[in-house]
Amino acid sequence: MLCAGGIDNARLLLVSGAPEAGGLGNAHDNVGRYFQEHPNARCAVLRSPDPSALQEPYSLLYRRRRRYLPKLALAPAVQREERVLNCGANLEYDYADEALNALRRIRRGLGAEPERADLRRDLPLAARGVRAATATAYRRFVHGRSPAAPPATVWLQVHCEQAPNRDSRVTLTRERDAAGVNRARLEWRLTDLERRTAATMVATVGSELRRLGLAEAEPAGWLSDAGGDWAERFSAVYHRIGTTRMADDPARGVVDSDCQVHGIDGLYVAGSSVFPTGGYANPTLTIVALALRLADHLVRRSQRW
């Protein structure tokens, strides 16, 4: 059973088996290919005469140790009409109040690596804004709401599906880790379809916000520059998908519908690496569902022995 994630599941298959075969389960050169992520970027600024009208319904909400993030999704009809991928978006806020920004950075830095938190900078800033910090803390812990301070900038953060791309892949390098195993190289490749999907999301959300009289969307300039460096503006979110994809036909995938590697009895793969496509939503629930389904399959198989 391989449960090492979207990169190392492929890596372990590639380094296993006969070298001339290209690794286990790789008769059709599919292992490591079709790597997908969820490209994320701030794709537009939302200009509003009343930012609180955007802030209240679309900011974070906390209830009983759960965090709820309101999101917008591209309607299936728009996807079909514009011939684009699935896509979601949420609103993000930057504040002019430096004390509030410092408080937010401190909160985000708790438990993070030391170099990511600059307490020498942020603690004095937060201390000078005790009143704002107190109001923010009261609103957060009593009412479960995000800060009420007017945001200086409201962003539309887009997170979209990535189309399966055979050239987006995990390969091996000659460098070896402490266990003597070849390290992985990731070639994450986006296509213009992802750019067009994000641009369609911005245009659709902008049109609706304008209709409601809430805001005007100002798209990022790079989003319309198909020949520019737009791909570098997207970041990954650690959702590693597709490198041991599921398919009934061994020529098109690595595992079958039971997550067993084609042609290798008893070798199973679990995790998001078996997804044929990635959608735009976080993969955890689907990973769990597939893991439970695989567990049921293994129980039934053991009962036949």
Image: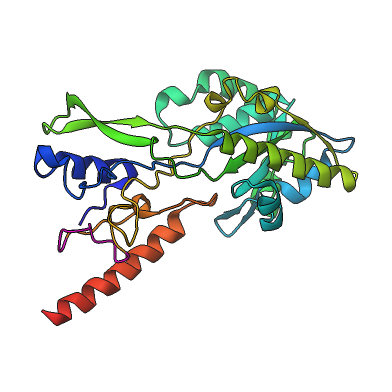
The spot of residue 18 in percent (x, y) is 8, 42
Location of residue 68 in the rendering, given as x and y in whole percent from the top left corner: 62, 54
- In this orientation, which residue lies closer to the viewer: 280 or 91? 280
Q: Is residue 237 magenta?
A: no
Q: Quadrant of the N terminus?
A: bottom left
Residue at image location 62% in from the left, 25% down from the top: 226
**Left or right: where 260 falls relative to 38:** left
The answer to whether residue 103 is left or right of residue 45 is: left
Quarter of the rendering containing residue 127: top right
State the extent of the magenta-drawn residues as a range. Answer: 257-266
- Please state which of residues 68 and 180 is positioned toward the viewer in this rendering: 180
Q: Quadrant of the C terminus?
A: bottom left
Residue lying at 57% horizontally and 38% vertically, measured from the top left: 194
The residue nearer to you, when weighing 227 against 216, is 227
Q: Is residue 85 above or below residue 49?
A: below
- Please state if 14 lies on the left or on the right of 96 as rendered: left
* Residue 152 visible (yes or no): no
